[in-house]
Image (cartoon, rainbow, N blue to C red):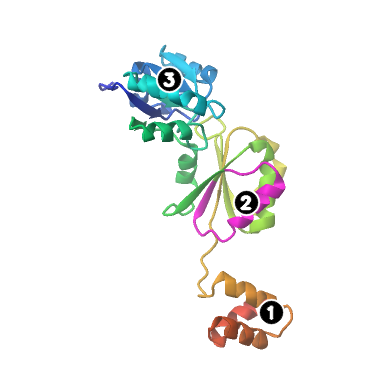
């Protein structure tokens, strides 16, 4: 193992494995073994990881419910020259895990914060999804209730970037059903389940086919899950969503030529530009 140095008065944000302990980096082990305190989302969960690597340093809880209460104490420790590592239950802290408030607070007080990179479920899933990765958006956990979930999906209906979500497997069928309802059954979806673990599964298909597959195989509703949804195909017609919506409404009451004439007058565009698109909508 190469030499790992930990400096006084610094917070180390340490990534840990999302399943396979062999993914623990050499640097992460070295940092956790040397810091004065390890701040954990769940001390009992992290203790199992530390025991595996024979690390016996002091641990303290730091989670969503006590971050703000702990921030002054952590600042004091760091200003006194203590070194602290921040870990979550799995993966990279702050990525849909606790840590944002304490990191933000400490940065405001000029504490140096050092990343120790490693596993991240969202990035791991994205790397094998086969969907565009040049531009993507991470949306965290979808709402647990269908109404709120559908509202969130509807707000992203025109998003052209690949979209990455976390979801609880027990509600995966309901989630994918909402994707079919809101975004359409043909939208490409990738489900990455139990990444790096024994029953790792990466399934890529249309939303409707994914829904059918989940209904047929309840074993896929277990473990940790990442859902990746392809972005909306780019509109090459040159017609904005606003014009398209107006034209769609007009076509409910008027023949295509008349609807195009009215829309062209409203938006100052040529009728011919709209006509082929109007025929597509009518079909």
On-image quarter of the N terminus: top left
Q: Is residue 166 left or right of residue 39?
A: right
Residue 106 image offset from top left, x and y in percent: 39, 31
Residue 250, labelled with which disc? 1
Q: Quarter-wise, where is residue 169 in the image?
A: top right
Earlier in the chain: of badge 1 and badge 3, it is 3
Residue 51 position (above or below residue 167): above
Question: Does residue 12 show up magenta in the picture?
Answer: no
Q: Position of residue 185 (x, y in %)?
A: 66, 57
Q: Position of residue 132 (x, y in %)?
A: 46, 54
Relative to 164, is 32 above or below? Answer: above
Q: Residues within 10 Å of mark 3 (few under 14, many from 20)?
A: many
Check residue 152 in the rendering and tell me which mark sits there, or answer none. Answer: 2
Task: Please tell me whether residue 159 belongs to the stretch shown in magenta.
Answer: yes
Q: Which mark is residue 38?
A: 3
Residue at 42% in and 35% down:
104
Figure quadrant of residue 261 = bottom right
Mark 1 or mark 2, earlier in chain: 2
What's the magenta region? 141-164
Q: CA distance from mark 1 to mark 3?
A: 62 Å
């Amino acid at each position: 193992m190469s030499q790992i140095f930990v400096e006084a008065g610094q917070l180390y944000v340490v990534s840990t494995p999302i399943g396979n302990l062999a993914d623990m980096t050499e640097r992460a082990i070295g940092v956790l073994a040397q810091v004065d305190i390890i701040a954990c989302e769940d001390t009992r969960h992290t203790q199992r990881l530390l025991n595996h690597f024979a690390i016996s340093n002091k641990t303290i809880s730091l989670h969503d419910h006590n971050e703000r209460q702990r921030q002054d104490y952590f600042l004091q420790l760091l200003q006194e020259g203590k070194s602290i590592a921040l870990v979550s239950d799995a993966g990279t802290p702050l990525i849909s895990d606790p840590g944002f408030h304490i990191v933000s607070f400490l940065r405001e007080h000029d504490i140096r914060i050092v990343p120790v990179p490693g596993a991240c479920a969202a990035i791991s899933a994205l790397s094998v999804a086969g969907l565009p990765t040049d531009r993507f958006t991470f949306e965290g956990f979808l709402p647990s209730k269908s109404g709120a979930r559908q509202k969130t999906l509807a707000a992203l209906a025109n998003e052209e970037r690949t979209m990455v979500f976390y979801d609880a497997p027990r509600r995966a069928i309901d989630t994918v059903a909402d994707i079919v309802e809101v975004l359409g059954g043909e939208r490409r979806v990738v489900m990455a389940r139990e990444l790096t673990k024994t029953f790792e599964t990466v399934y890529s298909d249309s939303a409707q086919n994914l829904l059918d597959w989940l209904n047929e195989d309840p074993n896929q509703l277990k473990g940790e899950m990442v859902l990746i949804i392809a972005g909306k195909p780019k509109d090459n017609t040159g017609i904005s969503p606003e014009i398209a919506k107006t034209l769609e409404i007009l076509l409910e009451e008027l023949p295509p030529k008349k609807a195009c004439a009215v829309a062209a007058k409203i938006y100052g565009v040529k009728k011919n530009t709209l006509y082929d698109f109007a025929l597509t909508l009518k079909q």
